[in-house]
């Protein structure tokens, strides 16, 4: 009897540790698409079993959620929230203020500074208010800086001085319990951009503006320099804020070579980078580890194929058939102390 119990619990243990999410002590997330969630069983199964955090890839962005000045559409975002709640996951909100995926009516909007502030405050507070108590954290502001560290010109930067701080204050007012992030990409390889973000955080903290986390998108590729990635992670963690690898993918064919073959060598190089990324994340003090989120689930669903039209790209840990790739298994083993 005892032996059976022992064997059973051992097998549960071993099975459990076959899952990446069980080999780590922080949240593992994926961004998702509501159409795939409802239409594709394999996709839904993986989203459900493999992750402990969910981000909407697109459906909480301005363009989708706020299609007209007097109309919000939360239907698809709500579907994602319902799925995540039913399967017991944390929900990460993405994103409130961005220069991209802005609805046409906002682009056409005319008004003085006060009118722009009212527009943005209304947007932020309606969205955050709608998801209050459901969404744990928000990418409040996304991609404000250019690679040279200067502030990116955008509808928001051009009409609202200090829009980052104001956005954070408005979001905080609408949900004082939400973890508020500044989110950006490509700090590795662009030290001025990295520094601009660190300066922003220091400035916000000194003014007691509510900023709780840094989102590092981590759209990286096999040629990305580890030393640079490591520096970004270390410096971000030194701020004392929560750190989220918020949109991870590791491209293997960054130059979009049409002849590219995803062979063992490419797959091994990718796996090494994934290991490095996860191990580096573990070096962040535990209480600052918000989690690692993949940018969608299988290679087929990746924005690198869809948005960037790179058919020979294989950036994620599940293949076209929703099978675990060798990198998934290797990564899980390497993080798992029992192996
Ligand atoms: C991308 C989505 O993946 C695409 O489906 C969409 O067409 C464009 O946006 N940085 C971000 C994300 O913060 O919101 C972007 O998502 C990828 C880059």
Image (tube, helix red, strand yellow):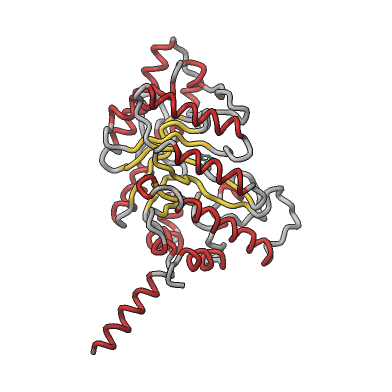
Q: Quadrant of residue 49?
A: bottom left
Rendering coords of residue 66 (x, y %): 40, 31
Q: Compared to 167, does 85 lie above or below?
A: below
The residue at the point 42 percent across, 52 percent down is: 29
Foreground residue, 232 or 248?
232
Residue situated furthest right in the rendering: 259
Q: Nearer the viewer, residue 268 or 143?
A: 268
- Give residue 169's quadrant in the image: top left
* Residue toward you, 329 or 58: 329
In the rendered image, residue 78, in percent from the top left (x then y), is placed at 33, 44
Q: Quadrant of the N terminus?
A: bottom left
Pinpoint residue 282: horizontal percent, then vertical percent: 45, 53
The image shows residue 239, relative to residue 9, as above or below, that is: above
Residue 126 occupies quadrant:
top left
Identify the residue at horizontal 26%, vertical 83% (top origin): 5
Q: Is residue 190 above or below residue 325?
A: above
Question: Would you place residue 81 above or below residue 86 in this image?
Answer: above
Q: Is residue 311 left or right of residue 318?
A: right
Q: Residue furthest top?
A: 112
Answer left or right for 98 relative to 219: left
Task: Identify the residue at horizontal 38%, vertical 37% (top origin).
Answer: 138
Q: Residue at x 34, y 79 (%)?
A: 10
Q: Position of residue 296 (x, y in %)?
A: 49, 52
């Amino acid at each position: 009897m005892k032996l059976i119990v022992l064997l059973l619990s051992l097998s549960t243990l071993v099975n459990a540790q076959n899952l990446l999410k069980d080999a780590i002590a922080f949240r593992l997330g994926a961004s998702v698409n509501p159409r795939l969630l409802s239409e594709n069983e394999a996709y839904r199964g993986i989203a459900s079993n493999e992750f402990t955090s969910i981000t909407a890839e697109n459906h909480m962005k301005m363009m989708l959620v706020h299609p007209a000045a007097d109309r919000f559409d939360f239907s698809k975002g709500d579907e994602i929230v319902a799925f995540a709640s039913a399967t017991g996951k944390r929900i990460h909100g993405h994103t409130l203020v961005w220069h991209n995926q802005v609805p046409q009516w906002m682009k056409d909007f005319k008004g003085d500074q006060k009118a722009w502030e009212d527009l943005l405050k209304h947007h932020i507070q309606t969205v955050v208010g709608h998801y209050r108590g459901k969404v744990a954290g928000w990418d409040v502001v996304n991609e404000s800086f250019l690679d040279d560290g200067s502030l990116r010109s955008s509808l928001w930067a051009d009409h609202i001085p200090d829009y980052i701080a104001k956005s954070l204050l408005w979001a905080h007012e609408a949900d004082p319990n939400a973890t508020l992030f500044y989110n950006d990409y490509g700090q590795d390889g662009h030290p001025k951009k990295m520094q601009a973000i660190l300066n922003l955080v220091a400035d916000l903290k000194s003014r007691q503006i509510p900023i709780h986390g840094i989102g590092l998108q981590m759209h990286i590729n096999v040629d990305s320099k580890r030393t640079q990635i490591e520096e970004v992670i270390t410096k971000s963690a030194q701020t004392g804020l929560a750190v989220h690898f918020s949109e991870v993918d590791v491209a293997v064919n960054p130059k979009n070579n049409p002849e590219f073959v995803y062979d063992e060598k490419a797959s091994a190089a990718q796996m090494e980078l994934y290991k490095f990324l996860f191990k580096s994340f573990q070096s962040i003090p535990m209480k600052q580890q918000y989690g690692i989120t993949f940018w969608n689930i299988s290679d087929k669903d990746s924005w690198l194929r869809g948005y960037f039209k790179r058919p020979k790209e294989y950036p994620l840990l599940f293949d076209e058939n929703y099978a675990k790739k060798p990198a998934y298994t290797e990564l899980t083993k390497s993080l798992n102390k029992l192996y």
